[in-house]
Image (tube, rainbow, N blue to C red):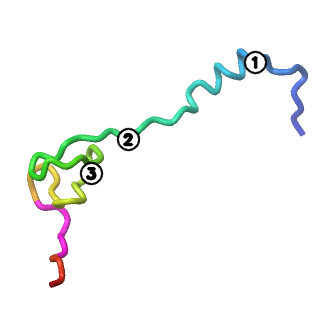
Amino acid sequence: MGVPKRRTPRAKQRTRRSHHNLTAPQLVRCPSCRSMHVNHQPCKVCGTYHGRQALRQEEPAG
């Protein structure tokens, strides 16, 4: 089993872990309904993506 010969310094350890951060998803405004949605994904409110209808929207019952 691999066991390190020396203890890893905090600076080396933190430098290695500097890329382990999380980023917030990129949000853009929908051109048709003006609601915020994730970039490169169809809008969940109106169902459009890149100027065309991508998702079928359910009609409200009633």
Q: CA distance from mark 2 to mark 1?
A: 30 Å
Query: Which quadrant is home to the N terminus?
Result: top right
Q: Is residue 27 above or below residue 62?
A: above
Residue drawn at (27%, 51%) of the image? 41
What amino acid is found at the position of numbered circle 2 in the picture? Pro
Residue 50 location, x and y as percent? 13, 49
Give the camera-side residue of 6 and 44: 44
**Would you call the spot at circle 3 few (<14 residues within 10 Å), some (14-19), or many (20 or more)?**
some
Q: Earlier in the sequence, mark 2 or mark 1?
A: 1
**Range of residues picked out in magenta:** 53-58
Residue position for label 3: 41
* Number of numbered labels in the structure image: 3
Residue drawn at (9%, 56%) of the image? 52
**Would you call the spot at circle 2 few (<14 residues within 10 Å), some (14-19), or many (20 or more)?**
few
Residue 27 location, x and y as percent? 29, 41
What amino acid is found at the position of numbered circle 1 in the picture? Arg
Which SS type dominates the magenta stretch? loop
Residue 55 location, x and y as percent? 20, 65
Q: CA distance from mark 2 to mark 3?
A: 11 Å
Q: Does residue 40 appear to the left or right of 1 in the view shown? A: left
What amino acid is found at the position of numbered circle 3 in the picture? Gln
Judging from the image, what secondary structure is the residue with disc 1 in? helix
**Would you call the spot at circle 1 few (<14 residues within 10 Å), some (14-19), or many (20 or more)?**
few
Residue position for label 1: 10
State if disc 3 and disc 2 touch (CB < 8 Å).
no
Q: Earlier in the sequence, mark 1 or mark 3?
A: 1
Residue 15 location, x and y as percent? 64, 19
